[in-house]
């Protein structure tokens, strides 16, 4: 990640820590309910099991229960087949992925989501290169990433630094075939009129320009040298489309990042060896948004980074491209865009999305004042 004064990181800061046990109601979310439904009432397999049970009871074909069960199972099967065909037509045949023969490049991989993805691939035997601007001592690298991960301190928002690192990665590990862009800047949480131009520029450089440099530098290697092709993963955010108040720089950069990914997908659509995966998530439990509280835990739960990392790795290993949106409400973002303006305003008011940042800042300041009262008094003076 791009920063003028990179913080010092230690292995202790990246190791998982115990957290207080959460009540059972914390896990009751829209995603949980949909997951249960997909494996029960909305599963074609379960629907045909019901048909077989009715058949075992010698239910006559003219019986309403038999007709409804067969019609329901057939409808679910057709929907499942249509989904598979749609994905195949839109994104082509999946490429073969063998973790042991892949070289994985992860930006922003010294913490949060990037760190988890790096660790997962390291455990699977892949060659992993991690890029980040944080300071990690050579002795701490094995504890943080594992023995088979190579760490390169690099400002991904600086093209020259990326070009220098490219040569080192190629010499030590080979040509990267899986590129996962997780680098992101911390949010400022300021309104447009109070946002310094330097802060806006820094966010755009880290979230958007860094991706532009990354793909321009590393994609040619996949196209020319990788026989089995490669996968490009862009980690963006639904905030690029929802654009909450107080996140002008972050939302603008993420909207541009998603647009950049879709443009690349259009340019490489004819090459079946190149797979593009766009990941647009809601709020994750990472330091980027640790002081922001989601407006509704039921509809928009805070994602655990390990859950997102697991979904990304599974999608990459399947060899497919496409769009991965988490949690469930994120899949409805495109529908939100076509709603009438008045309905959008009502939805924003009910969700509280435009008050989340300001409320988070107020709570953060109150907690800071409670923890450091002397510091707050000095500021007041």
Image: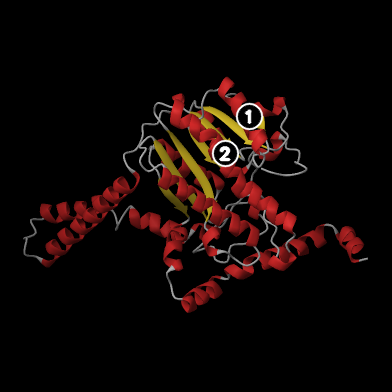
Instruction: Please report the residue visible at 55 percent of the width from the left and 23 percent of the height from the top.
Output: 173
The answer to which of 316 and 208 lies nearer the viewer is 208
| Count of number-bearing discs | 2
Q: Residue furthest bottom?
A: 342
- Mark 1 highlights which residue? 165
Instruction: Please report the residue visible at 54 percent of the width from the left and 51 percent of the height from the top.
Output: 257
The answer to which of 56 and 78 lies nearer the viewer is 78
- Mark 2 highlights which residue? 214
In the rendered image of this protein, does residue 334 appear above or below residue 350?
above
Q: Quadrant of the N terminus?
A: top right
The answer to which of 373 and 349 lies nearer the viewer is 349
Circle 2: is it few (<14), some (14-19), or many (20+) Cα within 10 Å? Answer: many
In the rendered image of this protein, does residue 213 appear above or below residue 35?
above
In the rendered image of this protein, does residue 46 appear above or below residue 225?
below
The image quarter in which residue 160 lies: top right
Q: Residue furthest right?
A: 381
Determine if residue 19 is in view: no
Question: Residue 62, position in %: x, y?
Answer: 6, 64
Task: Specify which label sits upstream in the sequence, 2 or 1.
Answer: 1
Question: Residue 182, position in %: x, y?
Answer: 57, 43
- For label 1, the SS is helix
Report the Cα–Cα distance between label 2 and label 1.
Answer: 11 Å
């Amino acid at each position: 990640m791009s920063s003028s004064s990179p913080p010092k990181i230690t292995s202790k800061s990246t190791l998982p820590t115990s957290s207080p046990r959460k009540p059972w109601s914390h896990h009751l979310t829209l995603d949980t309910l949909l997951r249960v439904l997909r494996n029960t009432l909305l599963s074609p397999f379960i629907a045909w099991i019901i048909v077989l049970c009715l058949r075992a009871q010698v239910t006559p074909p003219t019986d309403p229960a038999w007709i409804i069960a067969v019609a329901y199972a057939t409808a679910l099967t057709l929907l499942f087949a249509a989904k598979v065909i749609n994905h195949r037509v839109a994104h082509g045949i999946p490429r073969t992925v063998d973790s042991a023969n892949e070289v994985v490049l992860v930006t922003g991989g010294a913490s949060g989501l990037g760190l988890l993805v790096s660790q997962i691939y390291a455990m699977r035997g892949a060659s992993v290169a991690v890029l980040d601007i944080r300071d990690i001592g050579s002795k701490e690298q094995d504890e943080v990433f594992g023995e088979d991960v190579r760490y390169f301190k690099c400002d991904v928002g600086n093209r020259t630094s990326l070009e220098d690192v490219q040569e080192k990665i190629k010499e030590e590990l080979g040509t990267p075939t899986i590129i996962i862009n997780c680098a992101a800047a911390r949010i400022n949480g300021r309104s447009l009129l109070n946002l310094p131009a330097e802060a806006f520029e820094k966010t755009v450089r880290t979230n958007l320009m860094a991706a532009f440099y990354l793909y321009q530098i590393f994609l040619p290697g996949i196209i020319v040298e990788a026989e089995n092709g490669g996968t490009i993963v862009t980690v963006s955010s639904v905030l690029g489309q929802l654009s909450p108040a107080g996140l002008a720089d972050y939302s603008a950069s993420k909207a541009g990042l998603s647009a950049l990914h879709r443009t690349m997908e259009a340019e490489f659509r004819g090459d079946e060896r190149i797979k593009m995966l766009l990941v647009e998530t809601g709020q994750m439990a990472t330091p980027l948004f640790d002081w922001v509280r989601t407006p509704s835990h039921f509809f928009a739960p805070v994602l655990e980074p390990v859950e997102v990392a697991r979904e990304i790795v599974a999608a990459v290993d399947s060899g497919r491209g496409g769009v991965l949106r988490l949690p469930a409400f994120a899949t409805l973002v495109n529908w939100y865009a076509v709603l009438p303006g008045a309905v959008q305003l009502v939805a924003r008011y009910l969700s509280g999305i435009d008050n989340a940042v300001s409320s988070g800042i107020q709570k953060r300041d109150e907690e800071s004042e409670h923890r450091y009262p002397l510091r707050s008094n000095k500021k007041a003076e």
